[in-house]
């Protein structure tokens, strides 16, 4: 059991491996899931201070009607590590602070934190005092991941491979994770695997 008598589980994955689908299954099963992507979208669209810092750092062309053009900014920083780090410096601490507020507001003993770049953001998260009791990784084979990404984002094979290779390899993430959910099949198979892991989780924590 972690701080505030909560069992905190970090949920992560690779792009197009099905992490968000697993998060939705967990929610349907009654678990609280703190979604870093949702928090990010919220602050980029509504947090005036964050929007102004991004405007100052990247330029007026990324601000439309007082909010950030996420697609344009994402494409701009994708191949520019230095710019990506600048954006992370602006947003990540704010995202983590909001997630901690959400964590403290829940009475639930078990809380999942859905963090796409959990390992990449590990130092920032640790500095804020969040300690995970477990890490769950949603993984899939490369070809399955690529096919899903091509279909989801309507991009070509080369661009899909570039996007996948820009992240920490899943094999490396697997070594750092406690539970690995392989998602190479259909939704029914994934739901069965997640429910099996939930049952094991409840047995471990009761």
Image (tube, grey):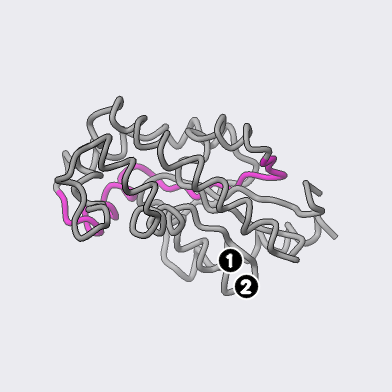
Residue at numbered disc 2 = 29
Which residue is more in the foreground, 114 or 145? 114
Q: Does the segment drawn in magenta span residue 69?
A: no
Q: Residue 72 appears at what percent x and percent y?
A: 18, 48
> Residue at the spot x=40%, y=51% of the render?
17
Q: In this view, does 79 lie above or below 31?
A: above
Compute the Cα span from label 1 to label 2. Answer: 5 Å
Q: In which quarter of the image is the C terminus?
A: bottom right
Given residues 173 and 83, the one toward you in this image is: 83
Quadrant for residue 195, please give it: bottom right
Residue 28 is situated, as x and y percent measured from the top left of the image, at: 57, 74
Left or right for 80, reference 33: left
Tell me where the magenta segment starts and ends, as one range.
130-155
Side of 76 relative to 18 (left or right): left
For residue 26, the mark is 1
Residue 109 rendering spot, x and y as whole percentages: 77, 61
From the viewer's perspective, is 152 left or right of 7?
A: left
Q: Which residue is drawn at 53% across and 53% down?
A: 114
Question: Mark 1 near mark 2, Cβ–Cβ under 8 Å?
Answer: yes
Neighbourhood count class around disc 1 (C-alpha, 10 Å): few under 14, some 14–19, many 20 upward:
some
Residue at 63% of width from left, 51% of height from top?
100
Asked which quadrant contains residue 26, the reply is bottom right
**Secondary element type, mark 1:** helix
Nearest to the observer: residue 35 or residue 137:
35
Residue at 66% over, 56% down: 103
Q: Nearer the viewer, residue 121 or 187?
A: 121
- Give the numbered dot on residue 184: none
3 left or right of 147 in image: right
């Amino acid at each position: 059991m972690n701080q505030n008598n909560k069992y905190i589980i970090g949920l992560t994955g690779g792009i197009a491996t099905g992490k968000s689908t697993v998060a939705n299954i967990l929610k349907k099963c009654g678990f609280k899931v703190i979604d870093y992507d949702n928090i990010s979208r919220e602050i980029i669209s509504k947090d005036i201070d964050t929007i102004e810092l991004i405007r100052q750092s990247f330029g007026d062309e990324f601000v439309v009607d007082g909010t950030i053009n996420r697609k344009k900014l994402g494409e701009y920083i994708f191949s520019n590590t230095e710019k990506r780090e600048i954006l992370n410096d602006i947003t990540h601490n704010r995202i983590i602070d909001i997630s901690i507020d959400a964590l403290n507001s829940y009475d639930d003993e078990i809380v999942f934190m859905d963090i796409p770049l959990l390992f990449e953001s590990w130092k920032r998260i640790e500095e804020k005092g969040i300690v995970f009791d477990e890490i769950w990784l949603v993984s899939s084979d490369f070809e399955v991941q690529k096919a899903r990404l091509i279909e989801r984002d309507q991009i070509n094979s080369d661009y899909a491979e570039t996007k996948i290779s820009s992240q920490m390899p899943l094999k490396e993430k697997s070594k750092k994770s406690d539970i690995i959910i392989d998602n190479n099949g259909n939704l029914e198979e994934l739901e069965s695997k997640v429910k099996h892991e939930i049952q094991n989780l409840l047995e471990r924590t009761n």
